[in-house]
Image (tube, rainbow, N blue to C red):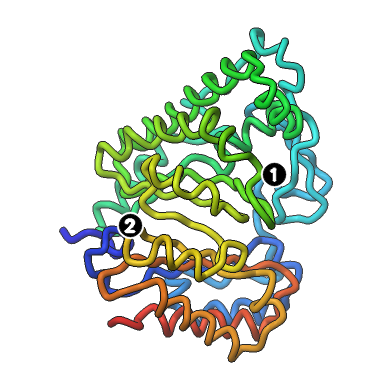
């Protein structure tokens, strides 16, 4: 059986087309005309092959961390709040704000949960084995924010960085306990069999990273490397996502085993991305949501996608593209982006 198209693209083994992903955030169902949104999705079957028009009006099953006026306590004891249905909230209560309580802290059970809600591993096994038997791409991954952001959620961002700078030895048992939980999740997926393991969390801000490269290398990178190694040794594709400016951290990520790097286009710069990755490491380009797709014209959007494809891809592969639609993007721009992603997916075909 041939490898899935995404794997061939990542490994520079001549994919049939450039993998394209278009994600519609749940909050959009309150912001756009629902009939118009359904019509738009149905008119782009390449991007939405499995879409079935729901009964309207439609209310998504919002994620537990994205429900307005419904604070959620996750498996770690972190309390989340949001003000907009569908938009992931922020943690307002940190269960390990005082590291002195760590000896009595009970870590969640990876046999029962992912850290952000329950999981049925038997059902997950059936789902992933079904995909692989059909020759489809079967990705899995840790929850978004698995290590650095989880430490921030447990202890608090400012306190975490201050304690890192102060070299507080009480951090290590927290980091080790978290890594053990994450490794158990990875092991579950490797036992099932997957094509890709994803290690997604945001490390960047609008300018620069949220953690210095030195602190990242000391406290975070070793966990990353160990969590990725077992999957890499089994021949599983290693995927990493981060929002924000991560230019000073990327070399450490790739050294740690990342084979597909998902990063944002404008904040890191297409010139920089092309110089560092084109034709060498597969890029999943996270398409701009702050500039061109928000304020530009459909023609400018088409030009942007065409330029990205020409500069970052080749007939051998090396490029995936992904876009997340959120409220305030003009519907005509969403259509233009869907049109362009469908068209340029077959640029080398």
Q: Is residue 169 above or below residue 199?
A: above
Q: Position of residue 130 (x, y in %)?
A: 31, 50
Q: Residue at x 63, y 29 (%)?
A: 75
Q: Is residue 43 above or below residue 30?
A: below
Q: Is residue 347 above or below residue 82?
A: below
Q: Is 245 displayed left or right of 349 in the figure?
A: right
Which type of secondary structure does the marked residue at label 1 adopt? loop
Name the image quarter holding the C terminus: bottom left
Q: In this figure, which residue is indicated by the disc labeled 2?
A: 137
Asked which quadrant contains residue 344, the reply is bottom left
Q: Position of residue 147 (x, y in %)?
A: 56, 34
Q: Is 87 displayed left or right of 140 in the figure?
A: right
Q: Is 290 displayed left or right of 84 in the figure?
A: left
Mark found first going from the N terminus, 2 or 1: 1
Q: Is residue 194 above or below residue 104?
A: below
Dot 2 and dot 1 residues touching (CB under 8 Å): no
Which type of secondary structure does the marked residue at label 2 adopt? loop
Q: Position of residue 6 (x, y in %)?
A: 33, 62
Q: Residue at x 25, y 70 (%)?
A: 316
Q: Residue at x 35, y 58 (%)?
A: 281
Name the image quarter holding the N terminus: bottom left
The image's mark for residue 65 is: 1
Outermost residue, left direction?
1
Q: Residue at x 68, y 56 (%)?
A: 207
């Amino acid at each position: 059986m041939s490898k899935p198209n995404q794997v061939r693209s990542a490994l520079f083994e001549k994919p049939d087309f450039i993998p394209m992903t278009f994600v519609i955030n749940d909050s959009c169902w309150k912001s756009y005309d629902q009939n118009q949104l359904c019509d738009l999705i149905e008119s782009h079957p390449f991007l939405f092959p499995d879409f079935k028009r729901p009964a309207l009006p439609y209310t998504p099953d919002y994620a537990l961390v994205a429900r307005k006026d419904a604070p959620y306590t996750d498996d770690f004891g972190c309390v989340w709040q949001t003000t907009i249905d569908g938009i992931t909230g922020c943690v307002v209560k940190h269960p390990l704000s005082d590291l002195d309580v760590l000896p009595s802290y009970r870590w969640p059970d990876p046999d029962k949960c992912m850290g952000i809600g329950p999981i049925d591993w038997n059902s997950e096994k059936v789902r992933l084995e079904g995909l692989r038997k059909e020759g489809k791409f079967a990705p899995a991954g840790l929850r978004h924010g698995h290590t650095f952001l989880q430490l921030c959620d447990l202890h608090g961002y400012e306190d975490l960085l201050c304690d890192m700078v102060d070299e507080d030895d009480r951090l290590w048992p927290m980091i080790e306990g978290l890594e053990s939980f994450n490794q158990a999740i990875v092991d579950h997926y490797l036992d099932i069999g997957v094509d890709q393991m994803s290690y997604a969390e945001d490390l960047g801000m609008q300018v620069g990273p949220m953690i210095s490269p030195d602190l990242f290398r000391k406290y975070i990178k070793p966990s990353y490397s160990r969590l990725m190694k077992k999957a890499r040794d089994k021949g599983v594709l290693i995927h990493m996502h981060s929002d924000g400016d991560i230019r000073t951290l990327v070399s450490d990520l790739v050294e740690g085993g990342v084979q597909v790097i998902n990063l944002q286009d404008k904040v890191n710069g297409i010139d920089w991305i092309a110089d560092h990755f084109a034709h060498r490491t597969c890029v999943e380009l996270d398409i701009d949501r702050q500039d061109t797709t928000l304020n530009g014209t459909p023609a400018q959007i088409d030009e942007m996608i065409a330029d990205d494809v020409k500069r970052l891809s080749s007939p051998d592969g090396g490029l995936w593209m992904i876009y997340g639609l959120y409220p305030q993007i003009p519907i005509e721009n969403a259509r233009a982006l869907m049109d362009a992603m469908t068209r340029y997916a077959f640029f080398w075909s």
